[in-house]
Image (cartoon, helix red, strand yellow):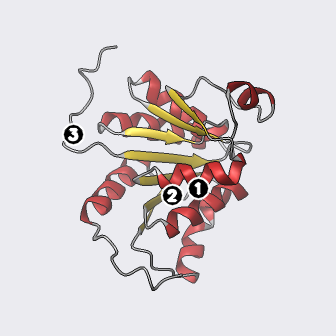
Amino acid sequence: MDTAHLKPTAQQFRIGVFGGAFVIDSERAEEMAREIGRGIVRRGHIVMTGATSGLPHIAGKAALEAGGVVLGVSPARDAVEHTNRYKKPLDGCSHIFYTGQGYTGRNYLNLRNCDMGVFIGGEAGTLEEYCVGIYEGLVLGALTNSGGICELLPEIVKRFKTDHGGAFCFSDEPENLLDTMISQHLAKVPKLDWTTGG
């Protein structure tokens, strides 16, 4: 694999890509998922997904095509359950960790192992992942023109303020969103007092 095109980085982050696994609102959302996958790799970072279908799968495949590493966190116990019971693909990740924890357990483990999270489109599971990210104090970014739950996230954040030390970034442009998120992550002050905010 030729990796000469990858941007060297002093610190490699694990950036989760979360979003619509079943519903994709537009071709533009699909293209944004590809841009996110390629953009994470171009900046020298690792893509993490729920080893799922839909927009995260599209982002993972684009990242792999760009020469990157994609870590998948599966709800299943093994590859057989992953493909037969959950009907999830195997080709969007370079490595898959089988949790055996179902969707909710998988979502929690996935967010716990990310440095940041990008959200594209999405349904109820995506909202759950966003809420876990809030409680983990992560920098979270949403593409607000990608459909699904991402169109509602700016209003949710505005109305329900919870301080767990994270940051929220919104954009309608994938490259801008990634740059803003990484800047916010680098500037973030770790939260030391966990007695407030939830």
In-image side of 74 versus 87 (left or right): left
2 or 3: mark nearer the eye: 3
* Image mark for residue 9: 3
Q: Residue at x 41, y 69 (%)?
A: 166
How far apart are the two marked residues, 3 and 1, measured between alpha carbons? Answer: 27 Å
Given the image, on which type of amino acid does mark 2 rest? Ala
Residue position marked by numbered label 2 in the rendering: 142
Q: Is residue 121 visible?
A: no
Where residue 153 sits in the image (x, y, percent)? 58, 67
Residue position marked by numbered label 1 in the rendering: 108
Given the image, on which type of amino acid does mark 3 rest? Thr
Q: Residues within 10 Å of mark 3 (few under 14, many from 20)?
A: few
Q: Is residue 19 above or below residue 167?
A: above
Given the image, on which type of amino acid does mark 1 rest? Tyr
Q: Is residue 123 above or below residue 31?
A: below
Where residue 122 sits in the image (x, y, percent)? 66, 52
